[in-house]
Amino acid sequence: MYNLLIVDDEPLICEGLSSLLAASGISIDHIYTAHSGYEALDYLKMEQIDLLITDIQMGSMSGIELMQQAKIIKPWVQVIVISAHETFQYAQQAMRLGAKDYLIKPLNSEQLLASIRDVLLHRSRAEHSQEQILSQFNDSFRMQQPSPERARLLGRLVTADEKERAEITHELALQYSTIVSGPYFAMMKLKLDLASSKRLNSVQDGQLLHYAAMNIAEELLNEQWDHCTYQEAEQPIATLVQWSEQQYGDASADKVNQLEMIGRSLQHNIEKYLGLSAVIGISQIFKGLEFMKEMADQADKALAWSRRFPDHYVFYFGDFKWELYGDSEPDEAEITKQNNMIVERCRSYIEQNYAQKGLTLNEIAQKNHVSPNYLSYLFKKISGYNLWEYVVKLRMEESKRLLLQTDLRRYEISERVGYESPEHFSKIFKKYYGMSPSEMKK
């Protein structure tokens, strides 16, 4: 059973699509509706959403911006975009952010239902394909490492000198031109915790788990990202993600957020399908394969940082102030001090801006010079609050004060604490306090 979220600033469209889906026979558990991107974000933060269906042009937050934020919050959410515009630029941006379809209004009911069934079926097939891999554990399955020659060449790039690197790059370009065209690259390294597996009975099982993880990475990346996944000997699985000049120049999506989105999706799916813990280290973005060693070193350092935070799984090199520590390993007191400073700055920013309409996790992270993924983790670890729960807490406390101590109406209070819709404000209020604003006023 699946949960769907429909987002459109025209209430009649939301109602019509809800009725259509409710009568479709598709295995749907719950249908949520939102009339703005900000309202939709609250549902994404509070509910388990499997499929997001969103309009492209909506008031103060577009469907593209909603997709960007949704991918930060829950990167595994599937998306179908609906639009009254056939503009290629919109469609291109939506597909680049992972939209599974782009449908033009007025919607054809059968086409929409077919698209939804296809997305949900694809999701089920992905689950089934991983089950098939796992079912082979006790069979006489011989694992062959995918593209060993490609892995060998890419591995050599890390240690090659300038002359040898030019030769290897030329050879890669001849044999695998699509994976080294770049010119912008970043590296992700994936380390499996095989000790956490209940399926590991032999060396062959360990190889198969790595093979299954590489298949999950390919399944996740193939449709949307220019990449190459490979593994050398006993090394972590490596994925080289690349962007062309045009893709890198597209300011519609933050590239670091994209990398962390991939990392979180990968970790989520490996845990879900393989029952394995996994840690992912991500390098910064470089221009040119001549920086392969730097990318590999950064990804390794990000992986190593996981020793300090065993309850976190995706680490971006740029989040850590390496220049403060030099070559020495920072002690616990230094790390704690730095992290407390990040959280306190974040808390202060939220307390000053929680009533701002359109406040997003991405904005809070940018103001504090860390990635949304790492900030969310630190804030929860140190303050005890999920970051957005803290925003809602401040909004609800202020709205309760205004409700009981002033004569302001519901829509005026909603406006003052940062909600665009009084109806949505009332839903959040009731979820938080267990009663509606009018019931509390009485």
Image (cartoon, grey):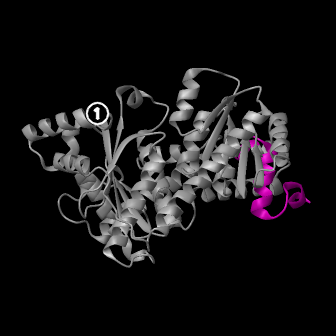
Relative to 425, 270 lies left or right: left
Quadrant in which the C terminus is drawn: bottom right
Relative to 12, 133 lies left or right: left
Looking at the image, which is closer to me, 88 or 9? Answer: 88
Q: Residue at x 11, y 46 (%)?
A: 160
Looking at the image, which is closer to me, 177 or 435? Answer: 177
Residue 300 visible in the current orientation: yes
Is 149 contained in the magenta span? no
Relative to 314, 393 lies left or right: right
Q: Position of residue 410 (x, y in %)?
A: 83, 47
* Disc 1: which residue: 177
First to last magenta residue range: 415-442
Residue 114 lies in quadrant = top right
Looking at the image, which is closer to me, 369 or 394? Answer: 369
For residue 96, above or below residue 205:
above
Q: Residue at x 68, y 38 (%)?
A: 54
Q: Position of residue 35 (x, y in %)?
A: 75, 39
Relative to 63, 409 lies left or right: right
Residue 419 visible in the current orientation: no
- Secondary element at image label 1: helix
For residue 95, above or below residue 399:
above
